[in-house]
Image (cartoon, grey):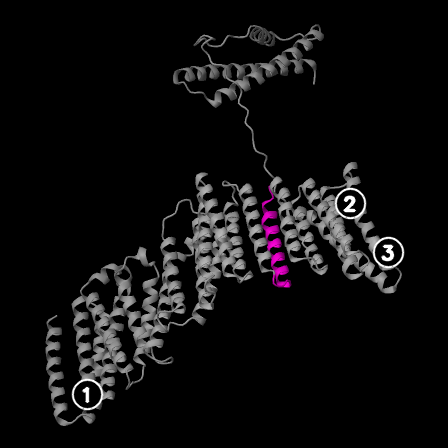
Amino acid sequence: MNERSICYRKELKCIILFSESVILHFFKHVLYWEKIQRGVGDKMNRQLERRVELLEEEVRRLREELAAVQKVDSSKINPSPELQSNRLQLKKALFDKPTPMQLTSSEDQPVLKPEVEIKQPIKPQRSLEEMITWALPKVFMVILVLGVLWGLKLISDYGYLSDSVKILLAYALSISLIILPYILEKKQKSSQAIIISLYGGAFIIGILTTAAGAILYDVLHLNMALIIAVLYVAYGIFISYYKANEILTIFVIFTSLLLPYLLEYMEFSELLIIQFVVILFGAIQFVIVKHRQQIALHITTSFTHLSALALWGLSENVDMYFAIGLLLIASIYLYSWWKLYEPESKWRAIHEGLLFSYHVFALITLLFVTSDLVFDTILFLLMLVIYSITAFVAYKERLQHVVDVAATVAFLAFVFMMVTFDLSDEVLILLFGFVAFSGIMLGMRLRAPVMQVTYSLQFFFMTLLTMATSEVKPFFALNHLSVVMICIYLIAIYIYVKQPKQNLSRFETWVEQANVQHILPIIISAYFMKYVMDLEHGYISNVGQTPFVSLIVLLGLFVISLFVREKWIGKFLVMALLIATSVASLVLLMTGYYADSNWSFNFLAKIIYLAVIIALLADFYSSGIVYKKYGELLSKKIEVFINTGFVLCILFIMSILSLLDHSGWIDYAVAVTGNTIAIFATASAALMAGAKRGWRDVKIMGFVLLGIGIFKLIFFDLSALDLLIRSALFIVVGGVGLLLSNRLLRK
């Protein structure tokens, strides 16, 4: 490219940049004017001002470059008149910078400082490959430790090294693993993952070596072993604090909890052991709170609590010490949790749920650790006080979710305190059911999906346990109360689920799409019917007999559901009850004949079912309340429902007459005559209804029933009845038939 072209391009670029600068200046002063008129600053004005400054700097730079090119090659370059004219205009524009539009004086114009937007750094998401690479040092360190241990075991088996030498070599390896990462870190020749793995490996080798030297090989004096173990624990806490690695913190507390078992072997007092556990847990909190390691908090608390329980199981007659230790662990955990709590965190619900779950677990363990009534009462009273204070402080801080959690735990502590006076199996079942119910309600209150699912499963198993172990007889008993409370819990859960919510979470959206709120009424009805059946078998009939009372109650539920609004009973309850009632009708039709007290319930149930069917048929025919409410569904299959109802009417009438005949209330001939009359009456009703409403299938059903009735009248009733009844029956049927025919012909 020749020098003329270069000069021309630079001039063209200057012209473009200058034009842009002029335009931006114009917009800037327009925005200034708008700001003065409206009294409002504009972020766009600041952005344009910054852009103008950058453009002016670029123009100055290009001007200098253009002047240098013109100075060097002015004798060689003979610009055309057009180019020379453009150059003169550009120089004039550059050296005679146009003044901005004087809309206001400079004194009146506010000085705007450029706004600096501070963007939060976005934490990059690790890929699967990066996660695997990150975990490899930990895995290989464990493999290395196992390899060393097996190697020492192999050497020991062959007798090459004495026990003392093996312990010294293990300590040498541990110290080497402490020095090596320090050197690597100073020289910056290794990654942090490798360094942390080496520090952790040194710690675990030291702890295991100390335990082996004192317990397995007996080469270390017990007091010396204790001192060395404590030094290693101190080293682990220090390195966790220094490196601020959450996994290392978990690893240190997990390994350090091996030391209490060493103390147990050394026959130290149980008081010293539980003191060590509590102090260790308290010391690690400095690391957790300092570096805000929430995951480490929950995991280390679980490890510590389970370790204390295991040591309690190995001890004797020291329940009081471990109960106090568990209370202190719960209190320390509460303090650290409060310090790390972030109300705006996306993991807020999980942390709140873990707070509740852990303290519920702590209450349950405290209930079984000691058997002293006074001491248990004091422990639960302290828990009540601690969480009441927590709820009050959270209320003052306007942390409503924490208030809910703390208040629930405080109330449970009060309930547990009352339960200590009676620890029977019935009381425990009632208590655990209430705990599961509290967890579900609190999970829905906190909108914590994991908590809802966990406690729902617990509630399900508690329901099964209650149904399997509890009885309803005697009526005023704790066993009976636990069964009733399950039903009350289900109703309360359903009422809360029905409450409208805003800004549904992903889990709540899934729950709504899965129609859980519509399935709950079915579950409640099923459990209620199970309860009614238990009551019937307990007080009315024996197990194995047909539960006639339960069948009547089921029909009552179905009838009531027909008149209740859908928003209260859900979309599917009516259909479920319809199916259940249909099955109950078939069961009722196939029941045997009872000469005892069940006969009356059998007869009553069939009468009630027949009456309800007739009432529904009348409602459908007259487009009554039920038909209007479910008209959209019934209009498509109305004739099917009508025909089914007519058939059921005949079957129930025949079943009732047969029952009366079997019990001796009526004569056989009366039963046969009644069956025939019922068939003709139903056929007549079907024909008249079909003709009146234009139901073709119903009319066909009427003709079919009429044919069946005539067939029965001729081929069965003639031989089964005496002459008097036969004559009266034929007269009645013939007369009714003529009237029906006349009515149909007039249509």
- The answer to whether 728 appears left or right of 706 in the picture is left
Q: Nearer the viewer, residue 720 or 240?
A: 240
**Residue 658 spot, x, y in % from top left:** 24, 85
Dot 1 or dot 3: first in sequence order is: 3
Q: Quadrant of the C terminus?
A: bottom left
For the residues labelled 1 and 2, the Cα–Cα distance comes to 101 Å
Mark 2 Cα-neighbour bin, 10 Å: few <14, some 14–19, many ≥20: some
Q: Nearer the viewer, mark 1 or mark 3?
A: 3
Q: Residue at 71% of width from left, 44% of height from top?
A: 193
Q: Which residue is mark 1?
A: 666
Mark 3 Cα-neighbour bin, 10 Å: few <14, some 14–19, many ≥20: few
Q: Quadrant of the N terminus?
A: top right
**Residue 2 spot, x, y in % from top left:** 70, 16
Q: Amino acid at mark 3?
A: Val
Q: Which residue is mark 3?
A: 165
Q: Which residue is mark 2?
A: 178
**Residue 410 spot, x, y in % from top left:** 46, 51
Q: Does residue 444 sit above or below 485 in this rendering?
A: above
Dot 1 or dot 2: first in sequence order is: 2
For the residues labelled 2 and 3, the Cα–Cα distance comes to 20 Å
For the residues labelled 1 and 3, the Cα–Cα distance comes to 104 Å
The span picked out in magenta is 292-317
- Magenta-drawn stretch contains 310: yes
Q: Is residue 515 visible?
A: no
